Image (cartoon, grey):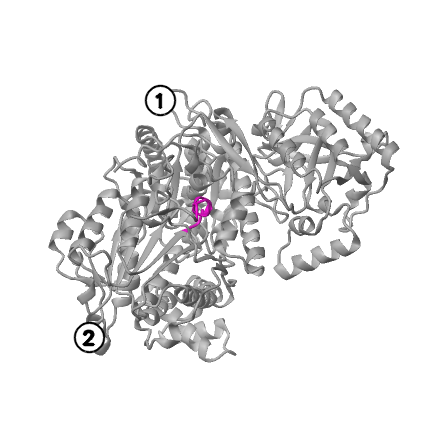
């Protein structure tokens, strides 16, 4: 059964089931197949595919977006008559061609109506400037969301729409195609109607032509100087909406600014209502100038452009919003107007239930790093071939065996997708091992050579008997990868299908120095591609049908690292085929970032419930240690030393590392302290309200003097990871000595001479160094969330639980801190193990360090909200903020 027939049956089934809620998917499919003269028993694969698609449409769940705004929203949509022509046809396109689930479309509709309500009304004469931010997830459908807003804005009077994409041509071209399909309905280069513009009905075709938006850009042509000079349409006189899809490049933005000024004869304000959408708004749009009265070039151009309009709305879209939240909301320049801080609103989109994101890849159900993730394969053989930190003048002359294994896995995934008759025709593999174009070229040559060997083996030996096949090492390796899926097809069918596709696979290098392109639309039967690249494949660009990703990159910046996550997204019916190959050090960082983003989202929900504004949210994030380290790159300016700020108010202090030398001395300090506290204050059973079994490991002391606390903290042996923060911690406590005069302490029984087991903490081997273990890399907290309930009264605990339930958040520690009136110090005893991977699976190694002393602090809200600042050196920056390297491609014009 062909794709078109499947699509027609799918659409008919959806329509039938929407009109008859008692109709099952099986009944609908059977009936529609019979109408097409097809027998179910002869089309079992197509039947199963249709059933999955239809069930996905009806069963996928998505929560409404969360909103912070300036509390000044005045609804206006109901006052403007509109037939919502553009919106209706776009949602119909998503339902039929895009086959988006019903709930996803419903939430998209409501979210973008809420968004448009917070923009200015373009149908009145009153000037307005509105600035907002929409936060999505990497590869979660952000483009579809802003296309929905574009269509709705056009329905309600916005005449000019400027869509600013990323800094690379491939992303701009891909976005232009989606705008052609989702808004314009016409491809001017191919001179054919596409997407929302397709119809066989003469009346509909006439309406499409009459209402077709004007577009000043094409798939191949940006808004160039030539375009500026030759464009005859003026937005203020155009009958239909005008749109341009432009690259975030200073030449392009200059062209737009000059064109806008000329359009209105140099007037100070242009009267055409404009919507500016800034895709990847955390990239290049942020002002990172060191000098307070200067702006970086692209930031200044966007602000200048925005300031030309008397009625203008600016919305940034991003999956990594940290840098945007760090924008100074008070930064104002008379010539450029406000900086791009989202002062009017921030929307946080929830991902649909069938989305695979950072949480699914890197965290377990408890929100901790998931070393047993079925989607992760650890790379441990790259240091001799493609090291994580490459020496100067390093040349890549050999591939790691793990990369070749990943290629085998990719070939198997193509075949199994075919066996399952998965609707997505394309299957991609991503190799991202360097930001340098020359190193990418070297890898391209080696991968091409290796693939050619595999291709020849499959072509000439694939049809042989199995005993003969496995004499070839390539086919033997493919066979081993296949065995996991042997119940889905027998071995001869597997190799037969592999022979059918092996000649179709392309190896491409995608960067600014290459002529290769990933144009999936040119492959009607599907593109199978191994794509090798760096920054060009790291932000915004979608690799269709991605199954296998191989990543070796030396950066720990959240916005850079997370945006490399092309493997996030929707993998219906083949998520089990998806694998991410990364070094364990990179896994630690990804897990840390995944936790940080989850915490940021939870914080957003809590602040939404308290009706706080974007400015208040930005202040909270800037003063916390949640978003600090993973956003600091935009503030670093490649300096040797950096001043950082932290506020511990209503947060926890957890060590980023534990010193492993002189452990006996450390144990002795904790034991001496425990004995003194027992003599001075007395100890009692440390009842944990959450009733965890481990609460029996601790004793509790109430109302301990802050002087005793500072004494212990000053004598603790900090690792190199916390030497800088040590002073920040002292300063924070001493500046609040009066309000923190009394503390609660829980002490592990082993420091009181009582035999008790230590708690287990497992870290990847890359966290262990000669004299310390890094605990923050993988988010490996010293304390557990339930431990922050120690010391709470029954009333405080119950109130925290009630707040957690209302917020619909599993993690409770933040609510414990919200209701705590005294700081809590937790003295821990830990057993540290290394996580190791063996051929038979992932297992825990032996205990490497036993009875290791460590501490954590749970701070209540402080009346003094000022953060403390401290200076860190370049070593700290490299170790915890990431490499200062910039991509060769990123620096291009």
147 sits to left or right of 61: left
Viewer-closest of 351 and 123: 123
Q: Residues within 10 Å of mark 1 (few under 14, many from 20)?
A: some
Q: CA distance from mark 1 to mark 2?
A: 60 Å
* Mark 1 or mark 2: whose residue is earlier in sequence: 2
Foreground pick, 610 / 195: 610
Q: Position of residue 872 (x, y in %)?
A: 52, 28
Q: Mark 1 or mark 2, which is nearer to you?
A: 2
Report the disc number at residue 235: none
Up the image or down, 144 lies above or below 254; here it is: below
**Residue 575 x %, y %:** 49, 51
Can you see residue 495? yes
**As drawn, 267 above or below 439:** below
Nearer to the camera, 871 or 205:
871
Q: Which residue is mark 2?
A: 206
Residue sitting at 32 percent across and 46 percent down?
Answer: 166
Q: Is residue 36 above or below residue 808?
A: below
Q: Is residue 474 left or right of residue 674?
A: left
Residue 420 among those drawn in magenta: no
Q: Position of residue 685 (x, y in %)?
A: 85, 43
Q: Which region is colored magenta?
A: 318-329
Residue visible at 71% across and 49% down in the picture? 820
For the N terminus, give its image quadrant. Answer: bottom left
- The residue tagged 1 is 395
Q: Which quadrant of the view contains residue 717?
A: top right
């Amino acid at each position: 059964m062909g794709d078109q027939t499947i699509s027609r049956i799918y659409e008919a089934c959806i329509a039938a089931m929407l009109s008859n809620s008692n109709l099952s998917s099986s009944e609908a499919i059977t009936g529609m197949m019979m109408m097409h003269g097809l027998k179910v028993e002869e089309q079992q694969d197509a039947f199963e595919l249709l059933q999955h698609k239809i069930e996905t449409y009806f069963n996928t769940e998505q929560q409404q977006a969360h909103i912070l705004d300036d509390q000044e929203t005045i609804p206006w949509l109901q006052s403007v008559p509109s037939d919502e022509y553009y919106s209706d046809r776009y949602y119909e396109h998503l339902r039929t061609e895009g086959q988006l689930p019903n709930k996803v479309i419903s939430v998209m509709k409501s979210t973008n109506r809420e968004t448009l309500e917070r923009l200015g009304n373009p149908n009145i004469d009153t000037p307005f400037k509105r600035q907002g931010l929409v936060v999505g997830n990497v590869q979660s459908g952000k483009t579809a969301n802003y296309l929905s807003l574009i269509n709705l804005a056009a329905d309600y009077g916005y005449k000019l729409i400027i869509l600013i994409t990323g800094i690379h041509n491939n992303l701009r071209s891909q976005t232009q195609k989606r705008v052609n399909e989702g808004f314009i309905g016409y491809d001017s280069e191919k001179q054919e109607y596409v997407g929302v513009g397709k119809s066989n009905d003469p009346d509909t075709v006439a309406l499409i032509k009459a209402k077709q938006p004007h577009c000043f850009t094409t798939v191949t042509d940006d808004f160039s100087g030539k375009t500026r000079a030759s464009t005859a349409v003026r937005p203020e006189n155009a009958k239909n909406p005008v749109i341009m899809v432009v690259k975030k490049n200073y030449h392009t933005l200059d062209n737009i600014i000059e064109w806008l000024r000329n359009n209105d004869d140099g007037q100070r304000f242009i009267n055409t209502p404009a919507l500016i959408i800034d895709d990847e708004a955390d990239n290049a749009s942020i002002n990172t100038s060191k000098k307070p009265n200067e702006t970086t070039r692209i930031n200044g151009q966007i602000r200048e452009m925005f300031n030309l309009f008397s009625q203008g709305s600016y919305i940034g879209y991003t999956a990594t919003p940290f840098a945007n939240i760090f924008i100074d909301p008070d930064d104002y320049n008379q010539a450029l107007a406000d900086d791009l801080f989202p002062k009017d609103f921030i929307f946080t989109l929830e991902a649909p239930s069938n989305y695979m994101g950072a949480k699914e890849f890197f965290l377990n159900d408890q929100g901790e790093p998931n070393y047993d993730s079925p989607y992760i394969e650890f790379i441990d053989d790259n240091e001799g071939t493609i090291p994580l930190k490459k020496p100067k003048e390093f040349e890549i002359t050999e591939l790691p065996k793990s990369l070749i294994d990943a290629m085998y896995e990719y070939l198997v995934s193509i075949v199994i997708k075919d066996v399952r008759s998965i609707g997505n025709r394309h299957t991609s593999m991503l190799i991202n091992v360097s930001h340098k174009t020359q190193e990418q070229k070297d890898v391209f040559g080696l991968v091409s050579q290796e693939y050619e060997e595999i291709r020849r083996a499959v072509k000439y030996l694939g049809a042989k008997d199995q005993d003969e096949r496995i004499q070839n090492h390539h086919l033997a390796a493919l066979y081993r990868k296949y065995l996991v899926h042997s119940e889905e097809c027998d071995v001869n069918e597997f190799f037969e299908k592999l022979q059918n596709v092996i000649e179709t696979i392309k190896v491409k290098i995608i960067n600014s120095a290459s002529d290769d392109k990933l144009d999936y639309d040119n492959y009607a039967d599907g593109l199978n591609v191994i794509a090798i690249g760096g920054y060009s494949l790291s932000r915004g660009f979608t690799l269709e049908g991605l199954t296998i990703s191989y990543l070796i990159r030396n950066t720990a910046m959240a916005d850079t690292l997370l945006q490399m996550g092309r493997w996030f997204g929707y993998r219906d019916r083949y998520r089990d085929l998806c694998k991410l190959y990364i070094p364990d050090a990179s896994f630690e960082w990804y897990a840390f970032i995944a936790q940080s983003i989850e915490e940021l989202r939870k914080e957003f929900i809590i602040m939404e419930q308290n009706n706080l504004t974007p400015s208040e949210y930005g202040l909270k994030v800037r003063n916390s240690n949640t978003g600090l380290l993973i956003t600091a790159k935009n503030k670093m300016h490649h300096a040797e030393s950096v001043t950082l700020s932290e506020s511990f108010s209503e947060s926890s202090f957890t060590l980023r590392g534990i010193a492993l030398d002189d452990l006996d001395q450390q144990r002795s300090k904790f034991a001496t302290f425990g004995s003194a506290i027992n003599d001075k204050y007395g100890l009692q059973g440390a009842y944990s309200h959450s009733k965890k079994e481990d609460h029996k490991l601790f004793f509790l002391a109430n109302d301990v003097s802050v002087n005793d606390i500072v004494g212990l903290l000053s004598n603790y042996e900090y690792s190199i990871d916390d030497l800088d923060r040590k002073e920040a911690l002292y300063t924070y406590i001493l500046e609040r000595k009066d309000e923190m005069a009394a503390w609660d302490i829980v002490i592990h029984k082993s420091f009181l001479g009582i035999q008790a087991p230590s708690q287990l903490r497992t870290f990847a081997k890359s966290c262990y160094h000669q004299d310390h273990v890094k605990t923050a890399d993988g988010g490996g907290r010293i304390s557990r969330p339930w431990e922050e309930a120690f010391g709470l009264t029954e009333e405080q605990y119950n109130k925290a639980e009630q707040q957690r339930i209302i917020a619909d958040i599993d993690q409770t520690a933040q609510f414990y801190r919200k209701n705590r009136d005294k700081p809590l110090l937790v003295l821990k005893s830990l057993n540290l193990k290394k996580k190791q991977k063996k051929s038979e699976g992932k297992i825990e190694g032996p205990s490497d360090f036993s009875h290791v002393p460590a501490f954590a602090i749970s701070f209540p809200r402080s009346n003094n909200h000022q953060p403390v600042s401290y200076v860190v050196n370049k070593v700290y920056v490299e170790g915890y903020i990431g490499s200062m390297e910039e991509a060769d491609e990123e620096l291009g014009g």
